[in-house]
Amino acid sequence: MTQEYPHAEAVAASLKWQSSSVGDQAGKPRIDEIYACDVFDMRKMRERLPKHVYKSMINTIEKRKRISMEDAEVIATAMKDWAIERGATHYTHWFQPMTGLTAEKHDALVTPDGEGSVVYRLSGKSLVQGEPDASSFPSGGLRATFEARGYTAWDPTSPAFIVRGTNYATLCIPTAFVSWNGEALDKKTPLLRSIDALDKQARRILKIFGTDEGVRSVESTLGSEQEYFLVDRNLYYARPDLMSCGRTLFGNTPPKHQQLDDHYFGSIPPRVNAFMASFEEELFRLGVPVQTRHNEVAPGQYEIAPLFESTNIACDHQAILMDTLKRVAGRYGFVALLHEKPFAGMNGSGKHNNWSMSTDTGVNLLDPQDETHTNTQFMTFLCAVIRAVHLHGDLIRAAISGASNDHRLGANEAPPAIISIFLGDMLTDLIEQIEKGDTKRTLKGGELTLGARTLPSLKRDSGDRNRTSPFAFTGNKFELRAVGSTASVAWPNTIINAIVSESLDYIATQIEGKLGKNPTEAKRDQVVQGVLKEIVKDHKAIIFNGDNYSQEWEDEAEKRGLPNLRSTADALPALQKSEAKKMFRKYKILSASELESRVEIFAEKYITEVCIEAQQMVHIARTMILPAAVRHQGNLANTINASEQAGASCDGLRGTHECFLDLVQQFQDQISEVEEKVHVPEVATLKQCTHCREVLLSAMNSLRDSADALERLVERDLWPMPTYQELLSLR
Ligand code: ADP
Ligand code: MG
């Protein structure tokens, strides 16, 4: 029996790559020469635009002012000329519907003029507004299928860019996507609204401290690290589970995987490094400021991290990064897996969401600075985050939920499902001082001397890091470490912006109410300290600096009343609470119906994904694994018969055969059981999510256990799919 997957071919492809790619660097442009060369960056368009249009565009970006139709007309022409010079033939309104992916529909930039020739055209109207058919995107009941109209609206604050490949170059215009009556059908619209809310409330705080002068806006900043796996493309196409679900539904962890910690930060294999360089080069062309690359914990796992940017642009760049990752991987014979848990028994992938707030003048509002105990403004912003996460940790948990991330959260590799804050020694000490009503000192880290005279002494931070915390303060920003690797970062950041806006509003209102007119600095600090003291008292339960993976923390968190929402089915109801509805409505981020639509979309996505996995499992089990097992069983029986006919005793083999028969029988029963339990409902409800989790997933787990037991017994040559060992050994 021959193997049905071309493992040998995958190896051959990688060897071919090695011989053909040596010396690629010769004649290449320097990396700084290509930075953002495919980006229509307004700040660099002074020469292409009339002065007044250029100025009003800069105003739009910096002061968040709406652009006029006349100006849009002029910008459209400049953008079109620029794109055509760079080889673009088409343009698209590029948006982020609720699928979590990006969407595009290309229109030609060139139109026949009716007189036998063609003209290049991009009108102001086509730049500003598009009208894709919205009926096939998830809407969560916001419109009926027959109400097909939807609009895309240009986001002038995020630069347009050109995506190119063999035979194509397409101008992509970032847009928001809304329904016929203006309800948000995407991830960008609520994010932009949340950025506006944060801007408004944060500036009230700055005003209180008199630090608002010259500040035109406050925005959240975001740097999101992306983890991913690479597998050989030929092996990928021999695994129907990877193709349709992005993760393996069957498979045994090989004897050696990550136990020796030899992959993390290990030397990057040459083919992978070559891929990374190409990948980063494309991102650089698109103005995505990527910075860091390294091997991650599991074999075959890697990470890329950009430099942080303002959140709206960082979210667009995150989406571009994921698209580019998948596209470029193919050129090197890889498939990039973004799933949170492609392989059982090994680390999965996440996305660390580094979040802070900054003024447009470049002041990081979460920078504690040296004498932190004198920095009352920092303490105010810090307390706002503490209060926000304590009151609305369940919304953060809901924002990172999903069928794929459920495999990761709480599995001792990613933070647990309990949301808490890590502050470290210095800030914890400061918070205790605030609670006592008197801040007197800032703990210092001091110096580390290393013993050897030639080594430098190191500046020691005032607190260690905590890798187990879901929401950790890391020097001058918070790191939400539980976002899934497949996720769009727009939604979690919408939530963080929203809840922090609410707390900033609360604090500003408290302080403003107590200050009176023209307060002295001393009076202001006294009032602020009083307000912060109460906040610390009420909300310090969210702070936890210990081991988040431990059972003790689970028990302790329960005593503190912190929710432990273990799965998507448990987490989504947070979005239906009246407090949540009120908050989203108050800050004009989501209306009640927009919020409700999200719950329905997330529930449907969860159920559909689990049901696809179940159906795929049944198919693989019945048409690939069972036949292999039956053949193996036949081989065993034939060997026993032949041996006994030849007069040999086969007691041992007979025992093996009988056990194997039992296992095959059990496996068959479990296939039927999964099949019976798959039920794709017409309308998704949270109750059905619970059914999936409690009934269907447990049947799937049992089926997997038997299949994996079979894999350990069936003759290697008969096994119908590449094993983990093969998938994870890149050459
Ligand atoms: P680590 O893996 O140790 O957390 P990395 O260097 O991989 O560190 O990633 C840190 C991320 O945090 C980077 O994307 C970086 O740009 C981002 N970051 C740094 N400062 C800020 C900030 N003020 N706001 C948001 N993100 C930030
Ligand atoms: Mg990190």
Image (tube, rainbow, N blue to C red):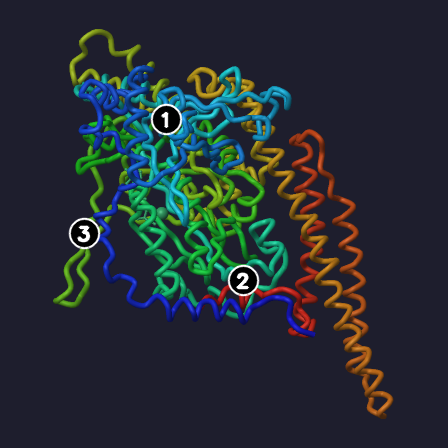
Q: Is residue 514 visible?
A: yes
Q: Tags 1 and 3 in contact by the CB under 8 Å rule?
A: no
The quarter of the rendering in which ligand 1 is drawn is top left
**Furthest-left residue in view?**
453
Quarter of the image where the N terminus is located: bottom right
**Marked residue nearer the N-terminal end (2 or 3):** 2
The kind of residue tagged 2 is Asn
User: Extreme bottom residue here?
Assistant: 647
* Residue 567, position as x, y percentages in the image: 58, 40
How far apart are labels 1 and 2 at the CA level? 42 Å
Q: Nearer the viewer, residue 149 or 299?
A: 149
What separation in Å lies between label 1 and label 3 (alpha carbons)? Answer: 56 Å
Near-viewer residue (678 or 144): 144
Residue 633: where, in percent of width, then height? 78, 72
Q: Position of residue 303 (x, y in %)?
A: 39, 53
Labels 1 & 2 near each other (Cβ < 8 A): no
For badge 1, the amino acid type reads: Leu
At horizontal 48% and vertical 20% (from top left) the residue drawn is: 590
Where does label 1 land, which residue? 122
Neighbor class of circle 3 (other Cα within 10 Å; few <14, some 14-19, many 20+) is few
Residue labelled with disc 2: 234
Q: Nearer the viewer, residue 527 or 62?
A: 62
Residue picked out by circle 3: 459
Q: Secondary structure at mark 2?
A: helix
Q: Mark 2 to mark 3: distance in Å?
A: 49 Å
Q: Residue at x 60, y 61 (%)?
A: 238
| Residue displayed at 81% across by 88% down | 643
Precedes in sequence: disc 1 or disc 3: 1
Q: Is residue 339 above or below residue 632?
A: above
Q: Quadrant of residue 113?
A: top left
